Image (cartoon, rainbow, N blue to C red):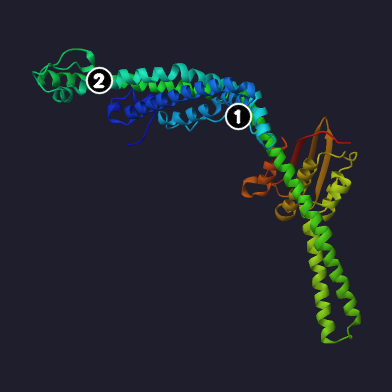
């Protein structure tokens, strides 16, 4: 039988035949045991912390007690799906520290509202909620259970004539017919009280989720943290690209240049027309082609012109290398922008020119770029056949994702028959 929501199951006639009553009882029993343990542990930590504070050992214990709501809340969020299986454990309202280590984690947690709200919940749980859970469980399950056990209780006590028994201290039962009647009453009570038991468990889970779910402001903070984390990843990615470009430029490329020069000198020393001269010529030409390919690879990883002279020069260089004649508009030269912005904009232009050369059938293209009012805008327009469909390839999708990290947008308009325009907008501030 599939596990469904207790709050929905309790309103159906099939409730008693489902797992919902058992899950409700397990949820409340787990809450009772967990709450009692938290109360005992909290009292012990508080007492020991206060006693040892004069010798400073108690201060870490009191700090741990102040943060004890965090693990309690995490456990409570994970217990909610026992009653509401369709809901995953509630998301944590806590942010990721910007720096590794316990001090950074502690400083962030102390400043978060969620930490103190979770501590308040832990206190409420230890003082009020778990006794209430235990009381409801006892009324709904323990009391009917005592009535159900009346025949066995009577038998253990010596049977009829031995003075009788009082199930649940309610009334005297001296005969087996009375004992079986009491057991039947206990069964009816157990089945009837299963409904309020389930309703209470569902309400208890909803209350927990309401108190421990992230608030709107905390969710916004978490979203901002995700955005900052993505930006840090982009910066790290760009730094790694530049490192690879430098390693190839200063290492492999220089060795290939030296190899090409050595092969060229060897060709001059070899007898003209000899087999050795032919093999050296072949090796020299092949080394030259490899060097050219390596330079193109380095330029594709991170063009040196972009790092040295900025986005305007890099766009002009990309236009010169385009397979389709490309004109660059003549606005004032762009200022130096953040490295991630320049790199994303440059590769957007490269991708646009590549697509124009491969798919558009265009005879000309034009690039315009400007930085005004804190926004970089670049338009790449061609006179091709149009009908562009960004969903057919991953290049534009990848560019859009990369720009989204910078709060930028990528827009492509290309009706059948053309023209096609790719527009990039990235909010950024000039660095010079």
What is the C-alpha distance between the residues marked 2 and 1? 43 Å
- Nearest the viewer among 124 and 305 is 124
Q: As drawn, is 363 to the left or to the right of 220? A: right
Residue at mark 2:
144
Residue occupying the point 32% across, 27% down: 21
How would you rate the neighbour count of disc 2 (Cα within 10 Å): few for under 14, some for 14-19, many for 20 or more?
many
Quadrant occupied by the C terminus: top right
Residue occupying the point 78% across, 40% down: 341
Labels 2 and 1 touching (C-beta < 8 A): no
Callout 1 secondary element? loop
Quadrant occupied by the N terminus: top left
Q: As drawn, is 164 to the left or to the right of 57? A: left
- Can residue 419 be spotted in the picture? no
Which label number is shown at residue 230?
none
What x and y, as percent, mark residue 426? Answer: 76, 36
Q: Which quadrant of the figure has residue 203?
A: top left
Which of the marked residues, 2 or 1, is nearer the chain's N terminus?
Answer: 1
Residue at mark 1:
94
What x and y, as percent, mark residue 177? Answer: 10, 20
What x and y, as percent, mark residue 300? Answer: 77, 54
């Amino acid at each position: 039988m599939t596990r469904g929501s207790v709050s929905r199951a309790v309103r159906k006639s099939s409730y008693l035949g489902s797992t919902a009553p058992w899950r409700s009882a397990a949820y409340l029993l787990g809450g009772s045991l967990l709450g009692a343990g938290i109360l005992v542990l909290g009292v012990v930590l508080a007492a020991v912390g206060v006693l040892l504070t004069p010798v400073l050992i108690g201060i870490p214990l009191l700090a741990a007690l102040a943060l004890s709501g965090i693990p309690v809340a995490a456990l409570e969020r994970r217990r909610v799906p026992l009653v509401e299986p369709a809901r995953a454990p509630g998301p944590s309202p806590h942010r990721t520290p910007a720096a590794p280590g316990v001090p950074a984690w502690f400083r962030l947690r102390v400043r978060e509202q969620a930490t103190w709200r979770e501590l308040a919940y832990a206190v409420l749980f230890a003082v009020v909620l778990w006794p209430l859970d235990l009381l409801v469980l006892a009324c709904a399950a323990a009391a009917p259970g005592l009535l159900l056990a009346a025949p066995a209780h009577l038998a253990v006590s010596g049977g009829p004539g031995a003075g009788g028994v009082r199930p649940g201290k309610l009334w005297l039962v001296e005969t087996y017919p009375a004992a079986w009647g009491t057991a039947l009453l206990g069964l009816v009570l157990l089945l009837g009280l299963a409904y309020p038991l389930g309703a209470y468990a569902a309400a208890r889970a909803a209350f927990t989720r309401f108190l421990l779910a992230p608030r709107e402001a905390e969710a916004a903070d978490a979203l901002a943290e995700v955005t900052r984390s993505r930006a840090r990843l982009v910066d790290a990615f760009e730094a790694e690209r530049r490192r690879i470009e430098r390693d190839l430029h200063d290492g492999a490329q220089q060795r290939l240049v030296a190899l090409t020069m050595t092969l060229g000198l060897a060709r001059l020393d070899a007898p003209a027309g000899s087999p050795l001269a032919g093999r050296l010529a072949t090796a020299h030409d092949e080394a030259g082609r490899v060097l050219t390919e390596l330079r193109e690879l380095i330029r594709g990883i991170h063009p040196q012109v972009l790092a040295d002279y900025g986005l305007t020069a890099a766009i002009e260089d990309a236009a010169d290398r385009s397979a389709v004649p490309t004109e660059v508009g003549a606005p004032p030269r762009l200022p130096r922008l953040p490295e991630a912005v320049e790199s994303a904009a440059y590769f957007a232009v490269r991708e646009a020119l590549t697509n124009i050369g491969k798919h558009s059938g265009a005879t000309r293209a034009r690039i315009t770029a400007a930085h005004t009012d804190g926004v970089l805008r670049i338009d790449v327009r061609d006179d091709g056949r149009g009908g562009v469909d960004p969903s057919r390839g991953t290049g534009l999708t990848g560019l859009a994702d990369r720009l989204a990290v910078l709060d930028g947008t990528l827009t492509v308009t290309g009706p059948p028959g053309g023209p096609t325009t790719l527009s990039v907008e990235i909010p950024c501030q000039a660095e010079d």
